Image (spheres, helix red, strand yellow):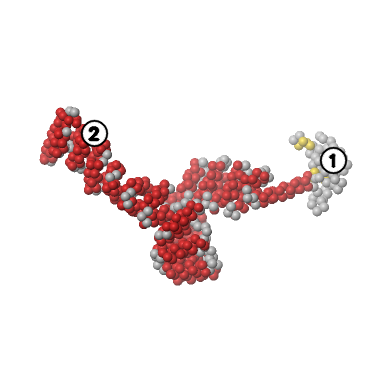
């Protein structure tokens, strides 16, 4: 026991603002109190603050300290938000801001689309271990929006907690990020890693994966496999899964399957506007306006009013179905509702009018878009420039391309390719070079379309060296080569006197596409033979003999025996034999003549004669006389005579067997 003295018990004194009294755990010298101990420490009675300046109560002190700390944290949050140099600012607030404070800043940067600051702040939070689950989820969300799935994927390896629930929520976010940004293969790898780490996928996991199937070439088959796995795991398809499946079917032009999933879902729950719009999009593939209109009526009967997405999709159905009058009327309705503030409805109508050959009507819609000062990202320009190019209206396409460059400073790759195509078709080399330079400045990596536009242009302008270098760059960047384009370039390079480059294009094509047209092997073989590149021709002949005609093979063999590498003559003859092709006596005659001309190659000649003997071939009389005449080069005339005699005996036996048969 601890004994203290106190004159009177402390009353509960209210503060001046009506708040309860604040107490301080500091005993006054005038206090005496007997108190018990807890865990070896005395329990002291609090003393209220007095006007005479007695010690401040703990409640008041904590309140004041708390308010002060909150103010400091708020100031620090604003300081970081307004900072233009996070590397210098963040160390100054270290220890002051907590994970939830930093998450507020992270969201602020994300909503402001300040992606560099989002990454910098999250990296600092990881390094200083000031983050929580919300930090990870928030960061992944903005990486998905900023289309930076690689950065988001790095999060997985930084997580050390192996709790299934913790990991599952973050992994689901990562899967959605990668799948929606066109990295479906990476999302599948992460999915496998999740399962290897002991995580049990849930419905959200499969929903995230399915969201990436829309952008895959064989997305529907992959989606079916995922759904099968989901059901085998004992999970059930929910409204979100059904919505994804309908959207996948729509993106793959599988209208019947989309309807089937829609009807299945209706037995489970009532469709929402997303399900209706996805099925409507499926009908747009073939312009099935009858089913589309019926679906909209059905949707309205359930109390769901068409929104901007539904009406815009219906416009797409009408436009693709060729109902241009209805399309115009619906565009007017969208304008009245305030749903035509962006260019998409206009572009849908313009594009389909242009593809239907109604260029002037498409131009009228384009002019209407400009008159209404509709916000455009340049997509409308892209449609009209492409339309003019297809119609060979080169002057109009050039003028519009120049206007587009003036009016828009920021372009994506699609717009750059559109402008590039217009300049290439018009043959404006200066503009083509400027556009390529601009793409480099904007750090836009060329895609498959970019390369094809340039290769066709360079070939047309007979700039074959540039065409070849562009194709080589395209191949090195991993793009699949187009066989028709490569074959055209191979022929043009050969005609221009660049057979080696033709062979290189052939090899790049074979590497890029294993199932090339059979005729291409013979085409390249003839090019190489004509150019005297017989060693390269031998490679093609050996690997593709069964695909090459007899006439082309004979032409190659004749050229090789006369001019090919003498050290490979025997290999060529053996390759013919393995390929099941007949070796004419003229081929042997030319080979023997070549060897006799080079006495130092007598070992190769002896090897050929022995091979002929063991495989039933006989030298003709002309070659026999030539060999006997030059027998001195062998040093042993008797050896040569014996070999020729054996060949003669074998030939008589062989002829006898043939007669009996």
SS class, disc 1: loop
Where residue 488 appears, as percent x and y from the top left, is 33, 53
Labelled pair 1, 2 in contact (Cβ < 8 Å): no
Q: Which residue occupies 63% across, 44% down? A: 130
Q: Which of marks 1 and 2 is nearer the N terminus?
A: 1
Where residue 357 appears, as percent x and y from the top left, is 40, 67
Toward the right, the furthest residue is 7
At label 1, counting other C-alpha atoms closer than 10 Å, the crowd grade (few under 14, some 14-19, many 20 or more) is: some
Residue situated in front as seen by the camera: 317 or 393: 393
Residue 44: name its quadrant: top right
Q: Which residue occupies 13% across, 38% down? A: 621
Q: Is residue 42 shown to the viewer in this render?
A: yes
Q: Which residue occupies 60% across, 55% down? A: 112
Q: Which residue occupies 79% across, 39% down? A: 43
Which mark is drawn over residue 600? none
Label tally: 2
- Measured along the vertical axis of the image, is residue 284 above or below residue 204? below
SS class, disc 2: helix
Quadrant location, the C terminus: top left
Quadrant location, the N terminus: top right
Judged by depth in the image, the label closer to the viewer, 1 or 2, is 2
Where residue 10 appears, as percent x and y from the top left, is 84, 45
Residue situated in front as seen by the camera: 532 or 574: 532
At label 2, counting other C-alpha atoms closer than 10 Å, the crowd grade (few under 14, some 14-19, many 20 or more) is: some
Which mark is drawn over residue 601? 2
Query: Which residue is tagged 1?
Result: 28
* Cα distance in 3D space between marks 1 and 2: 118 Å
Residue 459 lies left or right of residue 193; in this view the side is left
């Amino acid at each position: 026991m601890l004994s203290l003295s106190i004159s009177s018990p402390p009353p509960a004194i209210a503060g001046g603002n009506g708040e309860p009294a604040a107490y301080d755990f500091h005993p006054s010298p005038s206090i005496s109190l007997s108190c018990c101990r807890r865990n070896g420490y005395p329990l002291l009675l609090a003393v209220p603050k007095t006007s005479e300046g007695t010690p401040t109560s703990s409640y008041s002190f904590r309140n004041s300290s708390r308010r002060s700390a909150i103010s400091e944290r708020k100031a620090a949050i604003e300081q970081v938000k307004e900072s233009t140099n996070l590397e210098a600012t963040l160390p100054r607030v270290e220890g002051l801001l907590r994970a939830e404070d930093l998450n507020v800043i992270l969201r602020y940067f994300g909503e402001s689309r300040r992606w560099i600051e989002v990454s910098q702040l999250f990296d600092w939070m990881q390094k200083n271990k000031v983050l929580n689950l919300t930090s990870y989820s928030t960061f992944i969300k903005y990486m998905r929006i900023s289309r930076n799935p690689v950065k988001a994927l790095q999060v997985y390896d930084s997580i050390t907690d192996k709790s299934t629930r913790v990991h599952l929520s973050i992994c689901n976010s990562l899967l959605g990020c990668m799948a929606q940004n066109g990295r479906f293969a990476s999302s599948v790898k992460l999915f496998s890693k999740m399962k290897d780490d002991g995580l049990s996928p849930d419905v959200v996991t499969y929903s995230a994966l399915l969201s990436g199937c829309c952008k895959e070439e064989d997305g529907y088959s992959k989606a079916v496999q995922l759904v099968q796995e989901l059901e085998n795991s004992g999970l059930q398809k929910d409204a979100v899964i059904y919505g994804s499946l309908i959207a996948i079917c729509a993106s793959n032009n599988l209208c019947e399957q989309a309807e089937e999933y829609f009807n299945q879902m209706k037995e489970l729950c009532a469709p929402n506007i997303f399900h209706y719009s996805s099925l409507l999009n499926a009908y747009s593939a073939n312009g099935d306006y009858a089913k589309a209109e019926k679906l909209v009526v059905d949707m309205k009967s359930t109390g769901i009013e068409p929104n901007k997405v539904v009406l815009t999709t219906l416009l797409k159905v009408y436009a693709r179905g060729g109902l241009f009058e209805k399309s115009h009327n619906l565009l007017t309705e969208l304008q009245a509702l305030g749903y035509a503030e962006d260019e998409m409805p206009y572009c849908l109508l313009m594009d389909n009018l242009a593809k239907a050959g109604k260029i002037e009507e498409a131009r009228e819609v384009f002019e209407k878009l400009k008159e209404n000062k509709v916000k455009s990202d340049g997509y409308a320009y892209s449609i009209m420039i492409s339309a003019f190019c297809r119609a060979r209206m080169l002057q109009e396409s050039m003028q519009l391309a120049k206007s587009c460059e003036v009016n828009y400073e920021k372009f994506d790759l699609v717009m750059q390719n559109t402008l590039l195509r217009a300049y290439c078709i018009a043959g404006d080399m200066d503009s083509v070079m400027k556009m390529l330079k601009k793409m480099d400045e904007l750090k836009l990596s060329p895609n498959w379309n970019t390369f094809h536009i340039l290769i066709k242009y360079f070939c047309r302008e007979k700039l074959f060296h540039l065409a070849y270098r562009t194709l080589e760059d395209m191949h090195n960047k991993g793009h699949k080569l187009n066989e028709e384009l490569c074959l055209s370039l191979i022929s043009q390079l050969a005609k221009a006197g660049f057979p080696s480059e033709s062979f290189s294009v052939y090899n790049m094509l074979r590497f890029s596409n294993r199932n090339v047209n059979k005729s291409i092997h013979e085409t390249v073989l003839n090019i190489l033979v004509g150019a005297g590149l017989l060693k390269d021709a031998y490679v093609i002949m050996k690997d593709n003999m069964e695909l090459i005609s007899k006439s082309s093979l004979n032409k190659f063999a004749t050229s090789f025996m006369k001019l090919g590498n003498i050290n490979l003559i025997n290999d060529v003859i053996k390759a013919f034999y393995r390929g099941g092709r007949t070796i004419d006596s003229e081929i042997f005659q030319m080979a023997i003549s070549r060897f006799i001309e080079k006495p130092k190659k007598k070992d190769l000649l002896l090897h050929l004669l022995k091979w002929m003997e063991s495989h039933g071939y006989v030298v003709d009389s002309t070659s026999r006389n030539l060999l006997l005449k030059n027998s001195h080069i062998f040093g042993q005339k008797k050896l040569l005579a014996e070999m020729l005699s054996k060949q003669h005996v074998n030939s008589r036996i062989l002829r006898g067997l043939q007669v009996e048969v």
